[in-house]
Amino acid sequence: VSRVLRLSELADEAGVSLATVKYYQREGLLPAARKVGERRAEYDERHLRRLRLLRVMRDVGGVPVERLRSLVEAVEDEQASPHEMFGVACDALNSPFVDVGPEHAAWREIGDDLIAQSGWDRLRADAPDRDHLAALLEVVSGLSIPGDPESALAYFGLVDQLARFEIESLVDTGEQDRGSLLERMVVGQVVFGQMLLVLRRIAEEHHSALRFA
Amino acid sequence: VSRVLRLSELADEAGVSLATVKYYQREGLLPAARKVGERRAEYDERHLRRLRLLRVMRDVGGVPVERLRSLVEAVEDEQASPHEMFGVACDALNSPFVDVGPEHAAWREIGDDLIAQSGWDRLRADAPDRDHLAALLEVVSGLSIPGDPESALAYFGLVDQLARFEIESLVDTGEQDRGSLLERMVVGQVVFGQMLLVLRRIAEEHHSALRFA
């Protein structure tokens, strides 16, 4: 029951230019088209879904093409469980911040301890975000921002609620198709990540007005 | 009681190169040094604090130099209240995503309505984040991610708690110095923004494992 699309219809519906579709094809980011005769290529919903995914990654996530490739490989790896796939996607979407400071080992221990106390015991032991967190804790410690382990844990607890909310809303769709679940996870990481930062700025402007204006 | 620093000590303590200090000076991002005789320039804690701020913006926030300037202008504007300053900083730190879709006016209305229902009535009527939010809502609507206004409001409520938590921890320092409060606000926007995204990925990997593995 899949719709058949021509190249121009595909580009149009996905909201990208013909040149962009051809570029993604050359880069191996799109599944091959079905060739019909010499001069005609047919596309379907899978191509459309992939193009929309790539467009969101590029426009909203600012993900460079090299990292688009590792995302696509993860989406296409049929062996990976949804959870493994999620880990791969998280790593691919990681910001390139790896400015490791002189006290990194000590902060890594503190970070791992906060993660354990937050109950996040299913995080991979080698997840790069453990080093991310340690590096950020070290940056914060160099600034005149107060903080104690207890208030850190309260903050982590709020993030835990947000994350559970997002994961549940990804699952709770009735849709069982594996490919589309994985794509939703990836898009969720990017779009909801942006959404979270925008909402946070909005809420902080409001609370800053209440507090300071 | 302010310490006096030479150029090399200043660079060393701030963790940047001499070339970087000189570049920021040329760009007008650092206050002028105190000239002592022909060949010696003296710096103090203000220069150190500013340099640390600029370094965090660049390394953690990925803020380009043009936007560093608007941040510095906001920090140095003695007329601005802390709250006005916060708005300027938020706008300067805004991601450049302004991909406005064909249904923008309708989504803007929906977004403004969600903001009002979340009680964020102190947000400026002309805050650019209103358009950001509308654009993101439009992106989400084009994907196969479910969502209804009620669950959106629950999510917004969690972000509200996070934001209140952050603003209170900025205030609750006993330190009354206006300059350092403003700088903490700006740094908080960047560093805690990164921290939030890292923690969210960590928590989502954990919940994804519980749900899918």
Image (cartoon, coloured by chain):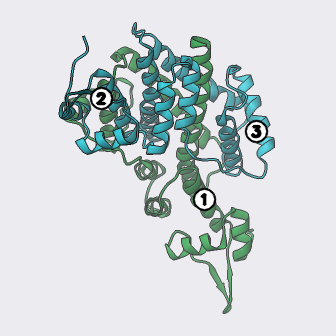
Chain colours: A cyan, B green
Three-letter amino acid code at disc 2?
A: Ala
Which label sits on residue B55? Answer: 1
Three-letter amino acid code at disc 1?
A: Arg
Image quarter of the N terminus of chain A:
top left
Q: CA distance from mark 1 to mark 2?
A: 48 Å
Q: Mark 1 Cα within 10 Å, few/some/many (few <14, many 20+)?
A: some
Q: Secondary structure at mark 1?
A: helix
Q: CA distance from mark 3 to mark 1?
A: 21 Å
Residue at mark 3 shares a chain with residue at mark 2: yes
Q: Chain of mark 1?
A: B
x and y, in percent, of residue A87 in the image: 58, 27
Judge left or right: residue B141 versus residue A172.
left
Residue at mark 3 shares a chain with residue at mark 1: no
Judge left or right: residue B205 versus residue A178.
right
Residue B174 visible: no
x and y, in percent, of residue A108 in the image: 76, 38
Kindly identify which residue carries mark 3: A108
Q: Chain of mark 2?
A: A
Judge left or right: residue B196 versus residue B147.
right
Q: Chain of mark 3?
A: A
x and y, in percent, of residue B69 in the image: 46, 64
Kindly identify which residue carries mark 2: A33
Which residue is rendered at x = 49% and y = 55% of the image? Answer: B63
